[in-house]
Amino acid sequence: MVQAFGWIPALFSLLIKDLLFTLIHQGAGGPIGMLMNTTAGLVFVSILSLLKTRTAKYIGYSLSSLAASLVMLIMNFLFLPLYTGMSFADAGSALGVGTSGLILTIIGFNIIKFLANSFIGDIAYSRIKKIFNNKDLKGGSK
């Protein structure tokens, strides 16, 4: 999305997706979850938009996924106590993984999530890009 259309359409797509998710799932995760997801998505899209070339695309996917995962770790550290009423360390203990296990779980989950989203989006776009490049849709002639 970012490589094809730019940062602003990707941002609007992200915001619409998060808004629809919140409305459809009646706020599952609440405003904190939506804020965290939107912030991580914004970091992901912003870094990816800096690396627009085809060669840098996969490096961009990797760096964006890592950055978004680190942002999610920080946001979980800040917002988990507000959301659950327990400290980050207590949440790790309650899950039976401890603080370091919780950190690894959050980073691992988010890296996998953002990389999967990157590659699925890349495959989907490569299959449908003919539609977006159709001159009739852009007001031109064949």
Image (cartoon, rainbow, N blue to C red):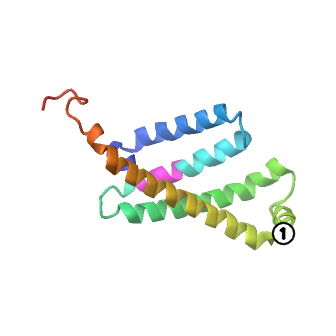
Name the amino acid, label 1: Gly
Task: Give the answer, above or below, for where 4 lies relative to 70.
Answer: above
Identify which residue is drawn at 60% across, 60% down: 110
Question: In the rendering, at what x and y percent does residue 103 appear?
Answer: 70, 68
- Looking at this rendering, what residue extends furthest in the front direction? 127
**Which residue has dot 1 on it?**
96
Q: Which sits in the foreground, 58 or 86?
A: 58
Residue 27 sits in quarter: top right
Q: Main secondary structure of the magenta part?
A: helix
Q: Which sits in the foreground, 8 or 97?
A: 97
Question: In the rendering, at what x and y percent does residue 77 appear?
Answer: 73, 59
Task: Give the answer, above or below, for where 118 lies relative to 101.
Answer: above
Q: How many marks?
A: 1
Question: In the rendering, at what x and y percent does residue 132 appear?
Answer: 29, 38
Identify which residue is drawn at 53% across, 57% down: 114
The reply, left or right, for residue 61 in relation to residue 82 is left
For disc 1, the neighbor class at 10 Å (few under 14, some 14 to 19, many from 20) is: few
Q: Is residue 73 magenta?
A: no
Whether residue 43 is visible, yes or no, is yes
Q: Secondary structure at mark 1?
A: loop
Q: Which sits in the foreground, 71 or 107?
A: 107
Identify which residue is drawn at 74% across, 55% down: 78
Q: Magenta part of the protein: which range?
A: 42-48
Question: In the rendering, at what x and y percent does residue 26 appear?
Answer: 71, 33
